[in-house]
Amino acid sequence: MVGALAALAHEHRLAAYRLLVEAGPAGMAAGDIAEQLGLVPSSLTFHVQALRNAGVISQRRASRHVIYAADFAAMNALVGFLVENCCGQGVSTCNPACDPALPSAKQRKMRGKAKSA
């Protein structure tokens, strides 16, 4: 858990991770992440490797592209770890689970743009 928190403690890594969470299980191509964050490819590679080594994202190849995706199980475990004592006093308002299958408004907008392109 400490490794994941340390990896996410950098502004570019956190921004990349947030993009990947918004993208959902399909993930994003490295070039698209770099473009959206305004990073040069070598800098992005450094940051996503730190996230990957921390176990919070995955990487796969699709032809010539490298696709990164948030590991939602790892994210839920991290959030669960952070709030594990929240519900210890009979409080039932805590629910750290995230369901990436349910797209947010931002995800629906991004998917709509991708389909129209």
Image (cartoon, grey):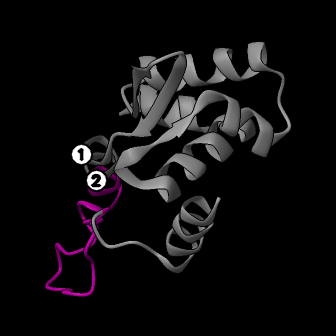
Count of numbered badges drawn on the protein: 2
User: Which amino acid, by three-letter code, is at mark 2?
Assistant: Asn
- Front one among 39 and 1: 39
* Mark 2, residue position: 76
Q: Main secondary structure of the magenta part?
A: loop
Q: Is residue 91 visible?
A: yes
Marks 2 and 1 sit apart, C-alpha to C-alpha, by 5 Å
Image quarter for residue 10? top right
**Element type at marker 1?**
helix
Residue to which mark 1 is pinned: 73
Examine the structure image and report whether residue 81 is included in the region drawn in magenta: yes
> Quarter holding the C terminus?
bottom right
Left or right: 33 in relation to 24: right
Q: Amino acid at mark 1?
A: Ala
Q: Say if the magenta span includes residue 83.
A: yes
The part of the chain drawn in magenta is 79-100
